[in-house]
C-alpha cells in the first residue's frame, strides 16, 4: 500500500499506538483559536455547550458566547441577524436538531441571504450510539449539500476538524461542519494538507478508488491495507472532506485511472457523499460504483462499534464492496 | 433624513404609498393586497418620522434597521422605500416579474433598504432579535431595531422562541410592531388559531406592550418614542389595523389577504384613494 508522503499522515497510522480523540474536540479548540484571532467570532449554542465542546469558548470568551436554549429555529435566525450586524457566528447543536430541525431557517435566513453563518452539527452519524435513532443524524449531509451557497465539510479526525472550523471561518458565507461523538483515530497531523474543496489522495493505486469522509476515511485506509495484503490490490483512498464544493477533478481523475469506485460514509446511502460523487462521475467518468453507508434505515441503541457493524459501515464491508465492484470493471 | 412632523404631509405620503401598492399589484397580477394597504400608515410613520436613516446611504453603519418578518406584505415596504428615495419608483412596476429586484417575498439586499430575506413566518423575528443582541451587546451601539410582525405570524413556534430570548436579554433596542389586522389566509385569526389575549401573552413573556390605532400616524410615532424610552424590556406595539385600509371593497376581508386586484378593481381602488384619472 502506497501512502502518499505529501499527506504527512501519522507515523502510527496502522499501529495500536495511534492517538484517539473525538472530532468534536477539534471543534472546541478551533473556536478558542478563532476567538483569540478575531473578535468578530461569536458562538451560539442550543443548550449543548458541553457536548458540542463550545463550552471551552464560553469559558474563554463569555461576552461572545450566547446561550440560546433548546430552540434551534431561533438559533439559526439569531445567527443570521448577528451575521448581518457584521459578526461571524458559529452555531452549535446536534446535527439531528441543526440542520435537522431548522432547515427552513438555514435555507432562507442563512443560505438565501448568503449570511456569514457557520453551522456546527455534532453527534452526527450512527456512532453516537446508545441514544438511539432519534439522535443519530444520518441525513444531514444530504439536506445541507442541496442548499445553494452552502459549503459542507466532514472532517476525518480531531486535527482536521480544527483546520476545517478555522477554514470555514476564513471563508465568507454559509458553511456546515459535521463532527461526531466517540473517540476515533487521529491519523492526520498538523502538517497534513487541508483546503476546502480540495480532496486529499491519501494512497495511490490503480485497482479501485475508495472515497470517504469523516471517520470512515480511517476505516477506508484499513480496508485498503487488507486489500493490499490479502488480495494484492492497490486502492486509491481519497479523503473527500469537502462534500460541497466537491473536488470533481480529483475524483474524476482517480475514477478514470482505476475504473471502479467505492464510497464510504456514516450517512444514508441516499443523498450524501456517495450521491455527490455519483453525480460527478455520471457526467464525466461513469464507472461501476458501490455505496457503503446506512442502507435506507433508521438506527437503534447500541455501542458505536456494534452499530457500525450491524449496518455495514466497516472495513470488511468496504473490502467486500471493492472486490465486488472490481469484478464489474 | 429629517423627520416630517406635519401629519397632513405624512397622510399624503401614506396615500401615495397606497396608490403605488395598487399600481404594483395590478401590474404584477399576483401578490398580497390587504396587509400592505393596512400597514401603509405604520410604514409612513417609520420611514418619514421615526427612523434614524439616510436613503442615500442605505447601509450606513449607525442606521436604525427595519426587518419585515411577515415578508408577504413587502409591496408596502418596497413602495415606502421608493417613496423615501431608496431607489427609483420605476422599479416598483417590475414587482414579481423575471429579473426584478423586487422579489415576491423579500430577498436580502436585492435592492437598497431590504435588510433581510423573509417569507416563512417567524424567521424575521429571530433575525431582528439576533441583530439587536449583536448591536447592543457586541457592538455597544444604541441603534434601534424595528421588526414588523403580523398577527398570523404568532402561530409560529419560532416567534415565541425569539420572544423568550429577547426578554431574557431585556433588549432595549428592539421594538416589534405587530400588525393586528385579525385576518390570515384561511380566515379570521380567532377562527384559525385564537391569539387572544395576545397582549397578556406578551406581558407574561416579559415584554412591555403598547396598543395603538395603526392608522393614527401620530399615535404610531408616539408609541415608537415611548418604546425607545423603555429600556427595561423589549417592546411590542400592537398596531390595530384594518386590512385593505383605504379601499372599501377590500377592508376587513380575509379574501384579499393573498390576492391582487384586476384592472377594473384597481381602477376603483385608485379612485377611492383619490386618483381622478386612470394612472
Image (cartoon, coloured by chain):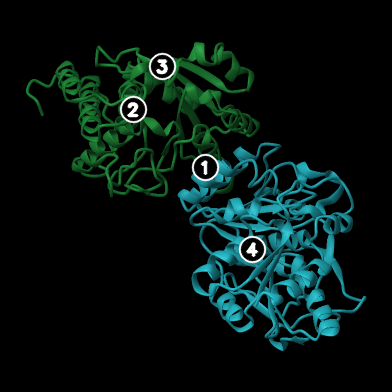
Chain colours: A cyan, B green
Which residue position holds label 2? B32
Q: Are marks 1 and 3 on the same chain?
A: yes
**Residue B181: image tag:** 3
Question: On screen, A329 above or below A146?
Answer: below
Which residue occupies the foreground of this view, B193 or B154? B193
Numbered label tally:
4
Residue B150 in sight from this viewpoint:
yes
Chain name for mark 1: B
Chain name for mark 4: A
**x and y percentages locating residue B15 in the rendered image:** 22, 23
Please, what secondary structure does the residue beneath circle 1 have?
helix
Along the horizontal axis of the image, is B213 left or right of A11? left
Which residue position holds label 1? B131
Which residue position holds label 4? A274
| Tag in front: 4 or 1 | 4
Q: Are marks 4 and 1 in contact (CB under 8 Å)?
A: no
Residue B140 in sight from this viewpoint:
no
Q: Are marks 1 and 3 in contact (CB under 8 Å)?
A: no
Amino acid at each position: 500500500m502506497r501512502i502518499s508522503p505529501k499527506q504527512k499522515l501519522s507515523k502510527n497510522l496502522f499501529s495500536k499506538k495511534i492517538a484517539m480523540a473525538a472530532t468534536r474536540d477539534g471543534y472546541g479548540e478551533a473556536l478558542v483559536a478563532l476567538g483569540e484571532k478575531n473578535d468578530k467570532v461569536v458562538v451560539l449554542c442550543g443548550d449543548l455547550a458541553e457536548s458540542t465542546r463550545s463550552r471551552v469558548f464560553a469559558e474563554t470568551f463569555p461576552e461572545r458566547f450566547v446561550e440560546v436554549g433548546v430552540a434551534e429555529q431561533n438559533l439559526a435566525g439569531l445567527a443570521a441577524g448577528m451575521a448581518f450586524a457584521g459578526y461571524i457566528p458559529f452555531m452549535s447543536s446536534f446535527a439531528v436538531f441543526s440542520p435537522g430541525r431548522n432547515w427552513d431557517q438555514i435555507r432562507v435566513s442563512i443560505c438565501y441571504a448568503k449570511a456569514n453563518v457557520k453551522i456546527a452539527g455534532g453527534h452526527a452519524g450512527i456512532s453516537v450510539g446508545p441514544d438511539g435513532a432519534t439522535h443519530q443524524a444520518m441525513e444531514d449531509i444530504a439536506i445541507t449539500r442541496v442548499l445553494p451557497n452552502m459549503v459542507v465539510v466532514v472532517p476525518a479526525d480531531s486535527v482536521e476538524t480544527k483546520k476545517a472550523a478555522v477554514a470555514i471561518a476564513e471563508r465568507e458565507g454559509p458553511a456546515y461542519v459535521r463532527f461526531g461523538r466517540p473517540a476515533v483515530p487521529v491519523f492526520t497531523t498538523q502538517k497534513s494538507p487541508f483546503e476546502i474543496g480540495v480532496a486529499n489522495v491519501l494512497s495511490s493505486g490503480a485497482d479501485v478508488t475508495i472515497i470517504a469522509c469523516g471517520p470512515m476515511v480511517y476505516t477506508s485506509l484499513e480496508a485498503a491495507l487488507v486489500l493490499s495484503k490479502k488480495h494484492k490490490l492497490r486502492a486509491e483512498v481519497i479523503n473527500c472532506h469537502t462534500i460541497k464544493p466537491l473536488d470533481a477533478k480529483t475524483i474524476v481523475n482517480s475514477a478514470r485511472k482505476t475504473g471502479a469506485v467505492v464510497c464510504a460514509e456514516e450517512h444514508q446511502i441516499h443523498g450524501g457523499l456517495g450521491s455527490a460523487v455519483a453525480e460527478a462521475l455520471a457526467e464525466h467518468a461513469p464507472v461501476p460504483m458501490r455505496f457503503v453507508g446506512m442502507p435506507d434505515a433508521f438506527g437503534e441503541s447500541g455501542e458505536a462499534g456494534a452499530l457500525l457493524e450491524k449496518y455495514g459501515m466497516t472495513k470488511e464491508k468496504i473490502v467486500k464492496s471493492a472486490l465486488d465492484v472490481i469484478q464489474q470493471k | 433624513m429629517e423627520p416630517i412632523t406635519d401629519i397632513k404631509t405624512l397622510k399624503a405620503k401614506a396615500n401615495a404609498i397606497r396608490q403605488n401598492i395598487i399600481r404594483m399589484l395590478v401590474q404584477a397580477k399576483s401578490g398580497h393586497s390587504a396587509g400592505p394597504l393596512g400597514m401603509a400608515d405604520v410604514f409612513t410613520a417609520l420611514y418619514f418620522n421615526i427612523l434614524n436613516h439616510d436613503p442615500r446611504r442605505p447601509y450606513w453603519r449607525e442606521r436604525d434597521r427595519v426587518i419585515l418578518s411577515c415578508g408577504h406584505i413587502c409591496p408596502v415596504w418596497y413602495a415606502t422605500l421608493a417613496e423615501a428615495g431608496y431607489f427609483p419608483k420605476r422599479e416598483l412596476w417590475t414587482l414579481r416579474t423575471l429579473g426584478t429586484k423586487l422579489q415576491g417575498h423579500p430577498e436580502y439586499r436585492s435592492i437598497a433598504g431590504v435588510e433581510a430575506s423573509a417569507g416563512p413566518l417567524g424567521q424575521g423575528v429571530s433575525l431582528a432579535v439576533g441583530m439587536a443582541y449583536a448591536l447592543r451587546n457586541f457592538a455597544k451601539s444604541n441603534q434601534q431595531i424595528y421588526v414588523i410582525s403580523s398577527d398570523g405570524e404568532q402561530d409560529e413556534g419560532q416567534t415565541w422562541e425569539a420572544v423568550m430570548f429577547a426578554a431574557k436579554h431585556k433588549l432595549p433596542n428592539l421594538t416589534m410592531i405587530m400588525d393586528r389586522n385579525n385576518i390570515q389566509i384561511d380566515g379570521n385569526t380567532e377562527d384559525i388559531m385564537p391569539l387572544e389575549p395576545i397582549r397578556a401573552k406578551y406581558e407574561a413573556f416579559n415584554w412591555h406592550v403598547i396598543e395603538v390605532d395603526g392608522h393614527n400616524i401620530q399615535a404610531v410615532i408616539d408609541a415608537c418614542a415611548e418604546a425607545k424610552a423603555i429600556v427595561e424590556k423589549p417592546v411590542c406595539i400592537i398596531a390595530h389595523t384594518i386590512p385593505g385600509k383605504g379601499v372599501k371593497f377590500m377592508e376587513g376581508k380575509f379574501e384579499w389577504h393573498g390576492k391582487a386586484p384586476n384592472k377594473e378593481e384597481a381602477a376603483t381602488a385608485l379612485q377611492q384613494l383619490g386618483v381622478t384619472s386612470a394612472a
